[in-house]
Amino acid sequence: MKRVSKFLFFIVTAVVLVASCGRQESGQLIGVLDRPAWKGINPYGMVYVPSGTLHIGPSDQDVNTSYVQRSKSISIQGFYMDDTEITNNEYRQFINWVRDSVVRSWQDLTIEDDNGNTYIDWEADINWEDETVEDLYYQGDEKFAGKKEVDVRNLLYEYEWYDWQRAAHDMDYSNRSKYIVRPDPVQIYPDTLCWIRDFAYSYNEPMTRNYFWHPAFDDYPVVGVNWHVANAFSYWRTKLWNSIVATQKGEVNTEDFRLPTEHEWEYAARGGREMAPYPWGGYYTRNAKGCLLANFKPGRGNYPEDGGLYTVKADAYFPNDYGLYNMAGNVSEWTSTAFDENAYSFIHDLNPDLRYDATSEDPQAQQRKVIRGGSWKDISYFLQTGTRHWEFQDTTKCYVGFRCALTFLGRSINDF
């Protein structure tokens, strides 16, 4: 009997101790226990690039490029990156989302939460026979050959971002609305006319008519999007993740999908190979059998030798050692970094990041953004992992696309 009483005493004591651990009245420093679990995330279509060091600068010891690519050792935090460039079909999901949200707002298919905020009701079905839908398409003399085509001027998207740099340097702790940047709505439909505009005396009208919407090009990289639109897509992708995946799986993700920085891109392109001039590690653009290893212009007027006259599928050719496809050639890629010829002389060696929120009134030199990787119409020099180039942030080109990055939260993916 004494044994049973003693056993029950120990059980009751243990239960009391365990119960008290979750209460502040326990008197112990145990932290807040009702925190959500975190086991890391693994976004579909992205690969993990671990933290590490990188020696940036001219990979082929070209003296002329050393003025804009000075040698410097830096460290990069781990991150996820899309294994391919964003494809036409992936980008079309963004287009359709904006199109449907526009029509739903026209038909008052909205809901209001307890705080008075109004949102699109995605559970409600669109009445595609309603007369309001007609406003989505070209009307009157803007119709061509009687076709029912979406008026792309209706496809506008509003996004915003937080200016952390400005907030960090404002020691007056002002109203934080000063740091929330809300640009004008951007027109998100790809500029398909760039296929004609980029080349004089060249017949590229079939690409203008077909490249973005035809199923033959679904898995090809989207082009004709400027730097602002690429940022808008990343913002939308973040909201899409948080509204669906994070809600269903209970995953807490405070980081945003975004464009990679210039040096995140270079670090990922090298695939862990020290001073690699190309993503595959070698010094040449051909393998031992003489086959070209990327989509670019290998000779004057010789575009199709590598297997693609224009772009190729986003997962064409072999990936680098991180599992990333077409980090050289196919299309050049936007980064978040502002271009400055002398940037390597003053950027920090820990996660270097040079940004400038240029407006249309700023001098053109301040509206340049770094692009990397070279494209289907470039010579091999632009394919090198260390080569820097730029485009104006508001320009669209038929040889510039993008892929997204996502900062990894934690020391290593192996910790989870």
Image: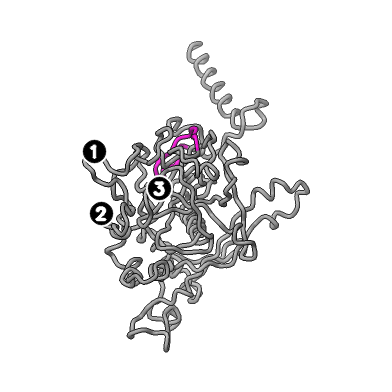
Q: What secondary structure is found at the residue carrying circle 3?
A: helix
> Which residue is under mark 1?
288
> Which residue is under mark 2?
305
Q: Earlier in the sequence, mark 2 or mark 1?
A: 1
For badge 3, the amino acid type reads: Tyr
> Which residue is under mark 3?
381
**In this view of the protein, can residue 157 be seen by the observer?**
yes
Please state the horizontal and vertical placement of residue 270, each as a whole percent of the image.
Answer: 41, 39
**In this view of the protein, can residue 44 be seen by the observer?**
no
Please state the horizontal and vertical placement of residue 306, each as a whole percent of the image.
Answer: 27, 52
Q: Write down the quadrant of residue 207 in the picture.
A: bottom left
324 vs 390: above or below? above
Pick the front one: 366 or 39: 366
Q: CA distance from mark 1 to mark 3?
A: 20 Å
Q: CA distance from mark 2 to mark 3?
A: 17 Å
Q: What secondary structure is found at the residue carrying circle 2?
A: helix
Q: What secondary structure is found at the residue carrying circle 1?
A: loop
For badge 2, the amino acid type reads: Glu
Q: Residue furthest left?
A: 289
Q: Are marks 1 and 3 in contact (CB under 8 Å)?
A: no
Query: How many numbered marks have been drawn onto this rendered protein structure?
Result: 3
Q: CA distance from mark 2 to mark 1?
A: 16 Å
